[in-house]
Image (cartoon, coloured by chain):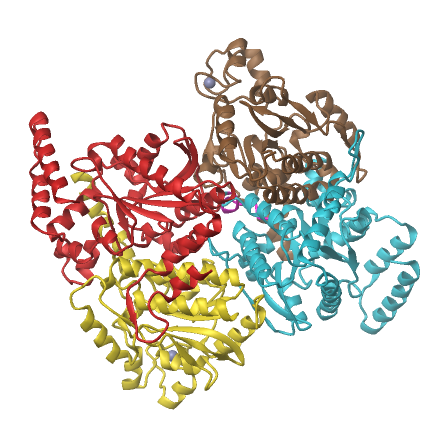
Chain colours: A cyan, B red, C yellow, D brown
Amino acid sequence: MKQDEIEQKIEELKRLAQQRSVDISHDLNRLQEKLSSGHSSPTEAWRKVELARNSERPTTLDLIDKMSDGEYLELHGDRLYGDDAAIVGGIARIGGRMVTFIGHQKGRTMKENIRRNYGMGHPEGYRKALRLAHQAEKFHRPIITFIDTAGAYPGLGSEERSVGEAIARNLKDFSTLRVPIVCFVIGEGGSGGALGIGVGNEVYMLENSVYSVISPEGCASILLRDPTKAQEAAALLKMTAEDLLQFGIIDGILSEPLGGAQMDHAATAAVIQQQVQDSLARLSAKSPDQLIRERMNKLMSLGRFVDEAAPKQGFLQRLFSRK
Amino acid sequence: MKQDEIEQKIEELKRLAQQRSVDISHDLNRLQEKLSSGHSSPTEAWRKVELARNSERPTTLDLIDKMSDGEYLELHGDRLYGDDAAIVGGIARIGGRMVTFIGHQKGRTMKENIRRNYGMGHPEGYRKALRLAHQAEKFHRPIITFIDTAGAYPGLGSEERSVGEAIARNLKDFSTLRVPIVCFVIGEGGSGGALGIGVGNEVYMLENSVYSVISPEGCASILLRDPTKAQEAAALLKMTAEDLLQFGIIDGILSEPLGGAQMDHAATAAVIQQQVQDSLARLSAKSPDQLIRERMNKLMSLGRFVDEAAPKQGFLQRLFSRK
Amino acid sequence: MGLLDSLKNALGLNQKQETEVSIAASRDDRAEVLQKHQCPNCHAHLDDGELERDFFVCRHCGYHFRITVQERIKYTVDLGTFQETASQVYSINPIGFPGYEAKILEARTASGLNEAVITGTGEVKGRKAVFAFMSFKFMGGSMGSVVGEKIARAIILGAERGLPVVLFATSGGARMQEGIFSLMQMAKTSAALAQLEVSGQAFIVVLTDPTYGGVTASFASLGDVILAEPRAMIGFAGPRVIEGTIRQKLPEGFQRSEFLLEKGFVDAIVPRGQLPEKLAFLIDAHQGRIRP
Amino acid sequence: MGLLDSLKNALGLNQKQETEVSIAASRDDRAEVLQKHQCPNCHAHLDDGELERDFFVCRHCGYHFRITVQERIKYTVDLGTFQETASQVYSINPIGFPGYEAKILEARTASGLNEAVITGTGEVKGRKAVFAFMSFKFMGGSMGSVVGEKIARAIILGAERGLPVVLFATSGGARMQEGIFSLMQMAKTSAALAQLEVSGQAFIVVLTDPTYGGVTASFASLGDVILAEPRAMIGFAGPRVIEGTIRQKLPEGFQRSEFLLEKGFVDAIVPRGQLPEKLAFLIDAHQGRIRP
Ligand SMILES: [Zn+2]
Ligand SMILES: [Zn+2]
């Protein structure tokens, strides 16, 4: 975000505050920090974590309902064990185009959150996602995914039915699906549970979403050996959209409405919908082989290291470029 | 079985009886019946049912151990929910050739039977079979299956995880596997639970095995409305190897040792092994497309009806022959 | 061995194959409502014209009455577009089962149909498809050679013409009177679906009350999308057989559509009145590669 | 929201991501046996030469000691056939995590290895294969960029040369110090396996004690065949994390190899001494299409 944009936002905020008599000191502080430094401070990273976890943010079904103008059908079940309400999926008509959608689904009320297990998937959720992805491939529908989970659920049933296997299979199978896949991190992108529906041709993050190998709390207690240092850990983990864009892990950042996505679901849906349409216009022009090659290329380039002997860094990537 | 063969067997039996002092009146009665009539009588059909259910008959693992001379590795689990001990599978080297084997597994002791659920599979058993079949296809191994079950288990877990779906998927996927599949009914061939691992290029039955859409007991109580009429139902259902060969459902009958397969496991294994080698020699010479076409052809020809308009009976079969 | 067998008997394991029982074959909710003008579920008053307009769904409680194949076609296929296929495929008595011919004649009279399935081509809200409608009134929707042949032909027709196949399932299971031939229809119809898959065309199943046995263990479980009407009874083994095995009453709601949805085997439960619209949406979403 | 969060805290749901804890990283059964000459399981006397000959398996109770990568190679690969690949791929500090460089230096000293995995080509009982051996001694076998790169390269080498890939897994999970880069190695290694699949070559995994986290949720669960050593601890989330979530002790044997076998995720449990023979059998059984 450029400095003049930020100054413009400050002006907008001040007007809004006067009109509605709301406390905007948080937002002002945050912008002030941005002005004073190019890097995200612990406070700033933590604020993103909090915004990403805000239970008023739009969920997968909120977004799909708006993006499809209600023209969607949720499809249930993995045809193996059960239907996981923490991961939803189905078919939607977006901008005239049929797509398969898959996403973590948090609740908003406590009752809904208990039913949906706070968006933390069990193996059957990941297997439903895979079933729907293969269905999409068979019928040439692009896939869009919405990532919003603290992680896969670490419980007995999850281990008994091997959530590890379920995630692993998705990682492998999604890498060679013959249709365009576009992923959106819309809230929390937590670890393997997020990545399990996160392999695509393009990955975008909402401005205030986060994406990390471990929660700041987990990192604080394991690596910093102090559970109270979650805010510090959030900054150390480099988990904001800006960090990931800089690392080359994601393809872009989608602006949220003023104050965060929770302030205006429709506007958030519109931004994502625009990106879906742009991405699919670009990706649908490519052959399945090209889609897979580009996706594979991206996946093979993930990682930073040095190789003091030939082949040099990027060896695997070049291998797939040649094909 | 030709009449002179039967007379020869009677002579053998008499000698054996003298040597070992065993009661052979059953076998003699049975042979006498054969001599007196070309069709199986209720008594004869029921005797086959009893022999097919004889708990001393060789099981899948008995046969595989003998056929591979101990050179086999059992592989477990469906990678989804569990390992079903009622359906076993793995890889064996038979006559120098690596094959994938799949079979129902009954126990011999009560403890083993409880563990193996009397060879009545749960969904995870059929899904393990499918996993191993796809593994075989990927690595170009022929598949041999051993059918020996009263049926899929009709319990809560079976229904909750949809044993119907599991069997259905096997029927569909086995029909287009790109490797030779040879099936052997070695004991009870009970309904969908048997057919769930029974789709192949060639199907053989041991002489005293049976194969039916429903158990004689079930047929008696539902259709004959008298549970005591199981013996009559057994004859009405036409479930013996000879019946099925006459119907064109199976490709051959394998002779059992005198008195039944339970009398000599090694001899039974040798007969099956010979058929495996003959069948695989023939089938391995065919291309995957040809294997599928022939299998599909056979499947499409199953059924007897009249069609008073064109297309005539055999329409579907001819459709596949043309390809 | 004697001990094992007696144990198996005690556990009910020797009765386990009574899978193919016709489920609730005797229940006739339609006759009931015609006589009493009352919903058998909520007991609200229902008049005939109202029921007919509501696709035989109680407007008070959503109870779905069983409907005939003729009514099903009327509610599903656009008026004047249905063309029946394979209408002259008839059953014979392939294993010479006593009394089978008489049973078939009886079933024809009861159902007004030649067999337990009607197949054809038609349109749903302007979308072309191949259809198969099973009838529970014809020998409990049991699957014999003719049912298998007609369904396999319908599936192959979809593959050849590049059309999706929409099937309404209802069945008590395999037709035991045809012995091994009835069992083999499971393999035949499932193999036909493998061919439809190769063609890239969709197979959409609507499970209706009741669907059991060999039909559940073949094509009815193999839809690219599986819909179900509310509260339909669906399973492999019948409830009485399971109760006989486990020696206890089944939990409330066991084997209902809603149970199957929770267990992951039904994509969506769709009330009867919304079926044409959802089928049209799904056909739009499942365009195969070949579409002449 | 405050209420929800406090509830989540109460349920332990905010700590759920501590998946990647190094499991029992402190347990050092080898040091114990060297000092006490006693099996930590059955307390039988074990002398050093005997242990060495028995592949560090207690001959009295079958207890499997953890072994080093160097020992693993010796017990698995035919003498003189192992040729290391990608030996000069080193870690950097990609997200600038404080103290990471020091940790790596420490790990190098402790393990005698450059990184948490050694890859190479070699033969097992005369069968050529590509091998990958993970080391728990190097930062708990955690997967960062280098582990992901080396494993991906080994897999692609198998695809290119037409060789099966045999991998011995042990890991505490992702290497958190590399942040999002460590997470992404799960996708990278799994995608490489999709390429091995296209090549028709086999991927054979041997799970050893312990294997957890991101490694379980990627390549370690994707073997065409998955073997495990007896009593190895294997899972996605660590036992302490699960106990924190469910607020109760885990059942005895939970997450052991034998548990995974029963739950359908392990093909076979193979004692260490039989591994070479079983690997050779499996390589014979899994001949790929391309084999120059
Ligand atoms: Zn009502
Ligand atoms: Zn010991």
**Residue B22 drawn above or below residue D34:** below
Quadrant of image for the N terminus of chain D: bottom right
Query: Ligand 1 is located in which of the four quadrants?
Result: bottom left
Magenta residues span A152-159
Front residue (pair B97, D227): B97
Q: Does the magenta stretch include residue A158?
A: yes
Image coordinates for residue A234, horizontal then vertical, percent: 75, 45
Q: Position of residue C201 (x, y in %)?
A: 52, 66
Quadrant position of residue B105: top left
| Horizontal side of residue A106 vs C18, given as left or right | right
Kindly tell me whether residue B161 is visible in this rendering. Answer: no
Above or below: residue A200 compared with residue B145: below
The quadrant in which residue A116 appears is: bottom right
Magenta-colored stretch includes residue C130: no
Compared to residue D151, the image places residue B222 above or below, namely below
Q: In this view, does A199 lie above or below C253?
A: above
Q: Which of D189 and C48 is in front in this view?
A: D189
Residue, x 42% and y 52% (percent of image)?
B170
Q: In the image, C285: left or right of C103?
A: right
Picture residue at 90% right of the left edge, 50% below the top? A37
What residue lies at 79% left-to-right and 29% top-to-bottom?
Answer: A309
The percent position of residue A105, horizontal first and vertical second, equals 61, 59
Q: How many numbered marks, from 0 up? A: 0
Between B310 and C176, the one lying in front of the other is: B310
Measured as percent of width and height from the top left, residue A57 is found at: 69, 62
Q: Is residue B315 visible?
A: yes
Quadrant location, the C terminus of chain D: top right
